[in-house]
Image (cartoon, rainbow, N blue to C red):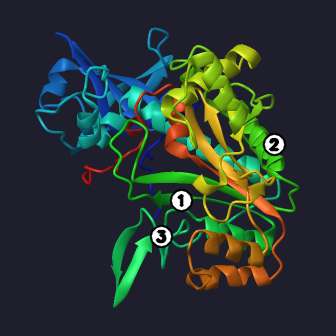
Amino acid sequence: MVTTAVQRVFIENISELVPGEVRLRGWIYRLRVLSETAFLILRDCTGEAQCVMATDALKDHRLKVEDVIEVTGQARREPRAKAGFEVEISAIRVLNRAGHSLPFHSAGQVDSVALDTLIQYRPLSLRTEAVGDIFRVQAGLLACFRDALNRRRFTEIVTSKIVGGGTEGGTNLFEIKYFERAAYLAQSPQFYKEHGVAGFERVYETGHVYRAEPHASSRHLTEYYSLDVEFGFIDGPEDVIQLERELLTDMFANLNSQYGEVIGKYRTDLLPSMLKVPCWEFDACLEMLRSECGRTDLVDDLDPEAERQLCERARKETGTPAVFVLGFPLAARPFYTAPRGSGGAASSFDLLFQGIEITTGGQRLHRREDLEAALRDRSIDPANFESHLAMFDLGMPPHGGFAIGLERLTCQVMNLPNVRQAVLYPRDRYKLTP
């Protein structure tokens, strides 16, 4: 039997059907009822449509903002409507009703709504333009990351997040019960990335990682989404830094092209090219901070204020508030980090962007005997890492990589002050719901 029923169409496709009958489904975004005519703005995942109906005919439906409805009607040209058309409603079907006492509405301004409220009512906040923009751009970042690496001969891998031990000596791990023994949530896919290099040469992974660190700040999470890259046959950490320059430049250019109008609401300039981002040695950075900012308190790492100060210095010199800092003290980096010279520095770097660290990366040790020596230097028995070390007997090339925190990167792209604004459901020291 052939059906002639009108099929549901997305709002963005209505212009192709004007004039003609359409069936729409979505949420009531705005509702304005006059004495004779009612104007209903319907919103779906593709846009908004102005729908009109006689006020008397609408009353029986008892509609309100955020109700979920289906509308059938005639689409026609209407220059006064924002989209250039409107739909004259012939039938309405209520699919579900929203509550009567919502904390905010999707058409309203949410600047004054508390972040905890936006998170508690996340589906509703996602329907607002301000919050929805954040996660649409974040999805764009993820897609651009994958696209840029796929074009560079990288293979995406998916690895386990339940592991038998830590990648950094077993600290800051979330322990879980795994049948008759203990297991842990992965701090990082680092070991698996390295195994991937031994098989594919160039790999990347996107996935959650977990850090049992008791932070309570605007930049830390206990569960975050990591964009991990690892590749082989490098000559040094400079190769890794250059790849990230090119990768971020590619990602930012595509993001500007696809989401430039949205990004322009959040920052005065579009995202910059990262090709000229300088690389400064860690010791030189400490000296710079001492001489120019009077900082004498830094020894083996940078604090948030130092990160801001270095980015400002880079902005004055290059026009881009970003800098790679290379050569952190080896003792402060994971055991698998390759040394940089013989003075105790590491072939490890951070990328600071707009005042905050968004990347840690570097060159890794690729010989089993060097890894075993590094473990012993830290009073760790290499036998504890035998399943990982065995992979280095299979032919491991010189390699390196980096990891970017997606939430932090989203914050810097959108100029957000709190990383929780870039997480659908944040997990930190205190928050476990919703």
Secondary structure at badge 1 equals strand
Q: Given the current orientation, which residue lies at the most extreme bottom position?
A: 180
The residue at 56%/73% (across/down) is 379
**How many residues crowd around disc 3 within 10 Å: few (fewer than 14), some, or many (20 or more)?**
few
Q: Position of residue 139 (x, y in %)?
A: 54, 43
Q: Nearer the viewer, residue 107 or 426?
A: 426
Q: Which residue is mark 1?
A: 207
| Residue 61 x, y percent position in the rendering | 15, 33
Q: CA distance from mark 2 to mark 1?
A: 23 Å
* Amino acid type, label 2: Gln
Give the quarter of the image for residue 306.
top right
Pointer 3: what residue?
170
7 lies left or right of 197: left
Label 3 or label 2, whichever lies nearer to me, is: 3
Name the residue carrying label 2.
242
User: Residue flagged by tag 3: what amino acid is it?
Assistant: Gly
Q: Residues within 10 Å of mark 1 (few under 14, many from 20)?
A: some
Q: CA distance from mark 3 to mark 1?
A: 20 Å
Kind of element beneath mark 3: loop
Return the disc, 3 or 1, that comes first in the chain's sequence.
3
CA neighbours of label 2 inside 10 A, class few (<14), some (14 to 19), many (20+): some
* Of pointers 2 and 1, the one earlier in the residue sequence: 1
